[in-house]
Amino acid sequence: MSVVRRCSRTACRQPAVFTLTYVYADSTAVLGPLAAYVEPHCYDLCAMHADRLTAPRGWEVVRLPADNTSGGPGSDDLEALANAVREAGRPPAIRPPAPTGQGVETNRRGHLRVVKSDPPRPEERPRPSVHRPSRDA
């Protein structure tokens, strides 16, 4: 027994052939081949509703070509698309600042602490500039 996925539009009984995914961070609607699995926050659409799809003002619709030759979803194209959508939805990674030196905790009061820096190593100390008078004077 084969289970046919139906269009997500209300009262539409047509078989689904496309999957619609939104990328809110980029204001983009992505319409691609039918996903291999039913995903939350994705909508399966029939050919008629996919052709009539419009996006809100300021949004872009990206239509990926459907692979009609295999009779089903493409190999890894849809999975790569889903991974790209997930990656776009993640917050950017914040890199910690570079360490400036070793500190030693000397005192603590509640959540506050006093940290004293170790003196710099001799090779890290700035060299003093030496002023030499010229022989002409």
Image (spheres, rainbow, N blue to C red):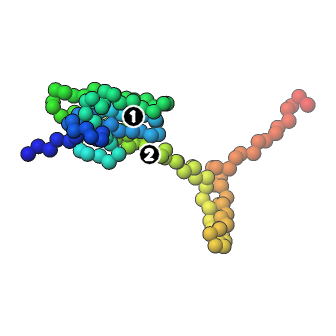
Give the amino acid type for the residue marked by disc 1 in the picture.
Ala
Q: Quadrant of the C terminus?
A: top right
Query: What kind of element bears circle 1?
Result: strand
Q: Which mark is residue 82?
A: none
Which residue carries the number 1 mark? 29
Which residue carries the number 2 mark? 90
Q: Nearer the viewer, residue 98 or 89?
A: 89
Q: Residue at x 61, y 52 (%)?
A: 100
For the residues carrying marks 2 and 1, which lies nearer the camera in this image? 1
Q: Nearer the viewer, residue 93 or 39?
A: 39
Q: Quadrant of the N terminus?
A: top left
Q: Which quarter of the picture shows residue 36?
A: top left
- Could one spot residue 90 in this view of the protein? yes
Q: Is residue 70 left or right of residue 26?
A: left
- N-terminal of the two: label 2 or label 1? 1
Query: What kind of element bears circle 2?
Result: loop
Q: Is residue 57 left or right of residue 33?
A: right
Q: Residue at x 20, y 36 (%)?
A: 15
Q: Which quarter of the picture shows residue 120?
A: bottom right
Q: How many marks?
A: 2
Q: Residue 119 location in percent, x, y?
A: 67, 58
Q: Residue 82 location in percent, x, y?
A: 33, 40
Residue density around tag 2, few if under 14, some if 14–19, many if 20 or more, within 10 Å: few
Give the amino acid type for the residue marked by disc 2 in the picture.
Arg
